[in-house]
Image (spheres, rainbow, N blue to C red):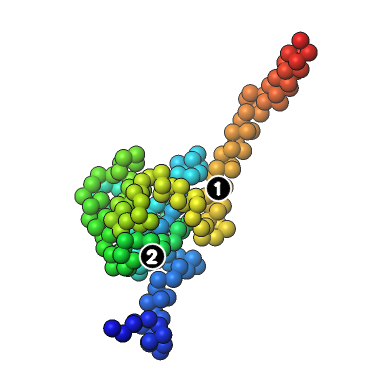
Amino acid sequence: MTSMDGDDFPNDPSLDEMKESRTVDTKREHFPLCLVWCPIPLITPFLPFVGHAGIVASDGTIFDYACDYDVNTDPHITLFGHVAKYWPIDLVQTETGAVTAYDDAIENARKQFSARPYNFFMNNCHDFVCAALNEVHYQNKKWNNASIALGFLQHGKYVSTNAILRTWLPTIILLFLIVVILFIFFDLPSLFFNLKSYNSEWSCK
């Protein structure tokens, strides 16, 4: 059987196009064969490690689940906006290593979750991603919400500096406001010095 890699067809433009279509390009917001993540308004500022996850097919189409009986598909953005982090999938670590099996798993998960009502705690975007990864036995493990969240912390790459700011700036502003409120309404400096004086008196005794 003849091998069908780039060395056998060095001048075949279709192979170059296929390779390009499966290459991550953050400027074009093209994330084939990746998991993607973005902040959730009003939730991520309070819990910066909690966000919205999706999975991307080999052609760069993003699939993400966030509403009843529907899975969103888009070539560039998720239901909650532009991608902030991406996590490349290594097909070698799937059961077959085949792109078609990976894409079929995403499609099967889409059909499955399109028939379900959405629940933030029990049936959410992370569950949708897990369904696709578990079908291809990615890394030969059972994926769940916690392992997806931990995976983004370990392997997720920010798209840009702007994505970092979009993720963390609201949290920083929120913490700043909390500190200001504590200073103004609870006289935090006095409370600190009173506590320090109390500790000094206690140590003298």
Q: Residue 92: name its quadrant.
A: bottom left
Q: Which mark is residue 93?
A: none
The reply to whether residue 73 is in sight is no
Residue 104, percent across and down?
A: 26, 63
Side of 87 relative to 55 (left or right): right
Q: Nearer the viewer, mark 2 or mark 1?
A: 2
Please give the name of the residue rendered at 45% of the width and 58% of the height, measured from the top-left corner: 87
Amino acid type indicated by mark 2 = Val
Q: Which mark is residue 92?
A: 2
Within 10 Å of disc 1 (Cα), the crowding (few <14, some 14-19, many 20+) is: some
Amino acid type indicated by mark 1 = Trp
Could you tell me how far apart the alpha carbons at marks 2 and 1 are, in whole angstroms? 33 Å
Please give the name of the residue rendered at 49% of the width and 65% of the height, measured from the top-left corner: 26
Q: Residue 78: name its quadrant.
A: bottom left
**Tag 1 secondary structure:** helix
Furthest residue to the bottom? 11
Side of 199 relative to 111 (left or right): right
Within 10 Å of disc 2 (Cα), the crowding (few <14, some 14-19, many 20+) is: few
Quadrant where the N terminus is found in the figure: bottom left
Is residue 82 shown above or below 40?
below
Quadrant where the C terminus is found in the figure: top right
Residue 43, percent across and down?
A: 45, 41
The tag earlier along the polypeptide, 2 or 1, is 2
Which residue in the protein does label 1 denote?
168
| Depth check, front residue: 91 or 119 | 91
Q: Badges 2 and 1: C-beta atoms under 8 Å apart?
A: no
